[in-house]
Amino acid sequence: MNWFHSPAFSDSGFRVTVTGDWAPVWTYEELMRRDPAVVYGDLLPLFQASDLNIVNVECVIGEKGAPLSKPGPCIKGAESIAIPALKAMPAHVATLANNHAMDFGPESLEYTLEVLCKAGIATVGAGMNGAAAAQPLIIPCEAAGGSLAIVNFGEGEACASLQGGPGVNVYTPETQEAQVRALKAAGHLVIAIFHGGREIAAMPPPYVVEGLRRIADAGADAVLAHHPHVPQAVEIYRGVPIAYSLGNFVFRRPDPPTYRSSGYLAHLTIADGTVKEVSLTPYRATEHGVFAMQGTEREAFLYDLRQLSDDLQSPEKVASLWNAFIDDALWISPTGERAEGAAAYFAQLQGALEVYRQDPAAGISRWHHYFFAPAHWHYFLTAFERMKLGTFGDAPEWARERVRRWKQ
């Protein structure tokens, strides 16, 4: 298998297309209101030719509930816009194990599950209790050998299911590995979809690389991921395709930097009980919709992606890119004060203390956010370890340049 060959559109096999983050907000809200299908640009025929489209719905739908106290935005999409736009694709499965699926509390998650179900869109990765959130989605599929199982898990952050309560299915490597093994033993073809890692990072952190490879070793037939809001590397690991971040899809703020407005669709062709082919379609998110890259733009994007994918095979380069990301830290306070490098970490923690002094509940939420999600505690621990060892700031210049390009 090779991610970089041109997508095949033959009638043989069962075709699955997976997208990154989707929400009917910001740049695209009014565009979708006017025409639910236009946002997909020239990608629409690809979805229509696919047997199964899996979309990461990165918001709640409807007006239920009140916003959570959490760092970052709480995102909701109007039902009258979201559902027609999803059906226009058409979306068959919505993955919900992300950090926005319960942004307006349990009531908002319950309503989102309800309206998606009524629209005929299956959901996976979130529920009104921990057991429901962890439940895989089983789809009859002759090409998969009888059935296809989709498991969806993520870091969850403020939307995580805690102590069996409502929320999203939390990523704990041993739990998902055991689940994948059990599904394979039951004869299912397994697609694992992860939402986590560090935002705007060129390379996934070492713990994500290790974790997703462990899911592949447990028996997953394909492993796909999103959340970083930028595209990341792909690989065929011991015969299993892994895509570390598909990037933003229909999730565009006004005038985003280059890599935050680009990504790729992941296509899987399933036949004879296995994933026979994989391919990707690079796209650019513009104010007029999402369009497939063409010509030199496509060639440049694929060159960058191949370079990252080659670097992924070197643990030293993965570590160098993660360390460069750590060294290039930037923190901007709510009042606009900036802190860079090592100072950014202390400013961020001090900011959480200030939030706590003014609003204890909000402060506790922020501290929990930092210590609960691996993306955050790996970030802080790596930085403080490098400071303790006197290595902070020594990441190689090639890695620092790559990190800056992805952040822009």
Image (cartoon, rainbow, N blue to C red):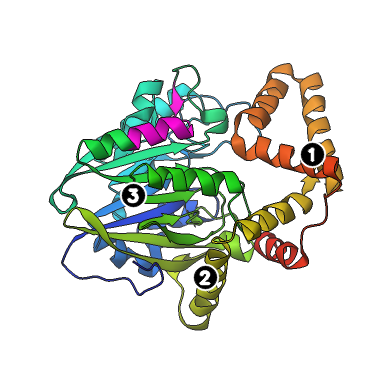
Q: CA distance from mark 3 to mark 1?
A: 38 Å
Residue at screen point 45% across, 57% down: 31
The reply to whether discs 1 and 2 touch (Cβ–Cβ < 8 Å) is no
Residue at screen point 46% across, 26% down: 167
Q: Which mark is residue 54?
A: 3
**Callout 3: few (<14), some (14-19), or many (20+) C-alpha neighbours within 10 Å?**
many
> Is 189 left or right of 145, judged from the image as shown?
right
Single out the residue that lies furthest toward the bottom.
Answer: 295
Q: Which residues are magenta?
A: 166-180
Q: Please state which of residues 360 and 198 is positioned toward the viewer in this rendering.
A: 198
Write down the residue under mark 1: 384
Disc 3 marks which amino acid?
Ile
Q: Which mark is residue 306?
A: 2
Whether 335 is drawn above or below 35: the answer is above
Q: Please tell me whether residue 232 belongs to the stretch shown in magenta.
A: no
Q: Please tell me whether residue 179 belongs to the stretch shown in magenta.
A: yes
SS at circle 2: helix
Disc 1 marks which amino acid?
Phe
**Callout 2: few (<14), some (14-19), or many (20+) C-alpha neighbours within 10 Å?**
some
Image position, residue 55 (x, y; %): 38, 49
Image position, residue 272 (x, y; %): 16, 57
- The image quadrant of residue 67 is top right
